[in-house]
Amino acid sequence: MSDNLRNNGITIREAQRSVDSWITTIGVRYFSPLTNMAVLTEEVGEVARIMARLHGDQSFKEGESGDELADELADVMWVVMAIANQNGIDLEDAFEKNLAKKTRRDTSRHINNPKLYKNPDNN
């Protein structure tokens, strides 16, 4: 993995291996792919709930806060890695290819988009 993506933490590949090791020991086995898809949807919904309260018009219920956002995002990453593992996908390789694709495709697309220069609060 390129040094600019590693940032002194674990690589995506190492994280995938850790997820696999945890699932196959502590977790006993992988959930079915369809169950993992449902779990991913659930976790993304939890991120959406927090974002709606942090940045949207909803307020937090009593006892809630935005402190869980990092943990919920990590839950999303966990399930994505489990799904990738089940399908033989190296996310580190896939991410690097995806970044290269976006860079080729969007080199001038966003810089030439006048909508991005408007104040997002004033639309």
Image: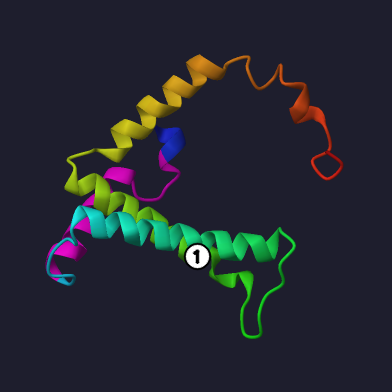
Can you name the residue that lies furthest to the right here?
A: 122
Q: Is residue 88 left or right of residue 106?
A: left
Can you see residue 6? yes
What range is drawn magenta here? 6-25
Q: Is residue 3 left or right of residue 112?
A: left
> Mark 1 falls on what kind of element?
helix
Residue 121, horizontal then vertical, whole percent: 83, 45
Report which quarter residue 88 is drawn in: top left
Report which quarter residue 19 is drawn in: bottom left
Can you see residue 1? no
Q: Residue at 33% across / 45% down in the picture?
A: 11
Indicate whether residue 18 is drawn in magenta.
Answer: yes
In the rendered view, would you say 45 is above or below 3?
below
Q: Residue at 19% across / 64% down in the picture?
A: 23
Q: Residue at 23% across / 38% down in the picture?
A: 89
Amino acid type, label 1: Glu
